[in-house]
Amino acid sequence: MVSLPRIAPMLAAPGALPATATEDHFAFEVKQDGQRTMIHLPGDGTTVLRSRSGADISVVYPEFAALGSALGRPAVLDGEIVALDDEGRSDFELLQSRMGLASAAKAARMARLVPAHLVLFDAVYLDGRRLTGLPYTERRTLLEGLGLDGEHWSTPAAVVGHGAQALEMTRAAGLEGVVAKRLASVYEPGVRSRSWIKVRHVRTTDVVVGGWLPGRGRLTGLPGALLVGERHSGGLRYVGSIGNGWSDTERITLAGLLEAAAIDDCPFDEVPSVTGARWVLPRLVGEVRYATRTRAGLLRHPSWHRLRPDLAPDGI
């Protein structure tokens, strides 16, 4: 059996689309919403999946065990494990029911209920040769030449140039966004590199502040996170906790507003499962940015954008 190198995944930096004048120097891939994995295929028919932290997660996803036999060559590939909704879109909430299972029997049962799919997008080692020093275009050609497309895994196409069109296509399809990868870039293990830029679709919504969590350390006495909700039929439905997006000045301003609005009882329809919450009159309105929502309506990856003193809390 070939001894394969342990190669940490290269990470994308958040940012905006490359300028139109330079977009032909980038390939655009769909940004998947799943679990990153490095796939180790020693060439003996076995498959080892490692998470971003390096942990062996092979037992969690039995549907990928046959990938080693399908390739039949020693390789280390980079990809993302996703669970697809009824419309074929990656759904992280679905995938969470698969993650972290230690029992092979339970993992097999869950694989039947919530099948996972492996999206392959890079090759970093092949047939005894480390590929990390090759440009993206050459690695991509080698990956596509492996012909790895099947029921449980695929190698989706990448588009060179046309970044705005690619981003719009993902928006219309309800996908998370795109990753722009510089064609000449080498693979940088473990590095969050500007050679790969992840561009997410940003959604905004107006929320009502119903509580907060005290900060720690240098934030002692200031809000560490806000607990926010959305109005419905006269009630206030909790939609999440927001812990970023403020400047120091804005955080101090919020602290004063929250102190003046302090109350004893939770203003949300249902008390959120958070420890140490302090409640406030639901009269502060803010605008937040977020990526998507869970099925329960909670905001995913929310960040604070601004106070909205122009909006009444009963009118949103």
Image (spheres, rainbow, N blue to C red):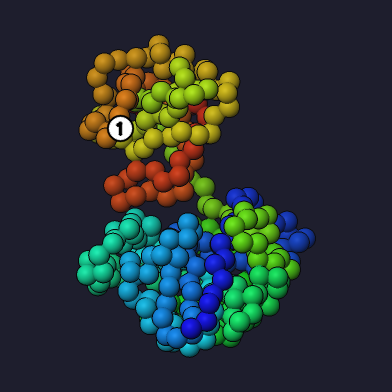
Is the residue 43 above or below the residue 133 in the image?
below
Is the residue 312 above or below the residue 20 in the image?
above
Is the residue 190 above or below the residue 109 in the image?
above
Q: Quadrant of the C terminus?
A: top left
Quarter of the image for residue 56 reads bottom left
**Which residue is at a point 38% across and 57% down the rendered structure image?**
92
Q: Which residue is mark 1?
A: 274
**Which residue is at a point 59% across and 76% down the rendered structure image?**
125
Of residues 196 and 200, the one drawn nearer to the viewer in this rendering: 196
Q: Is residue 313 left or right of residue 140?
A: left
Residue 204, horizontal then vertical, whole percent: 48, 41
**Which residue is at a point 22% across and 70% down the rendered structure image?**
105
**Which residue is at a point 48% across and 72% down the rendered structure image?**
39
Q: Is residue 314 left or right of residue 11?
A: left
Number of numbered labels in the structure image: 1
Residue 316 is at least partly visible in this image: no
Residue furthest top in the image: 260
Q: As shown in the figure, which amino acid type bears the numbered disc 1?
A: Val
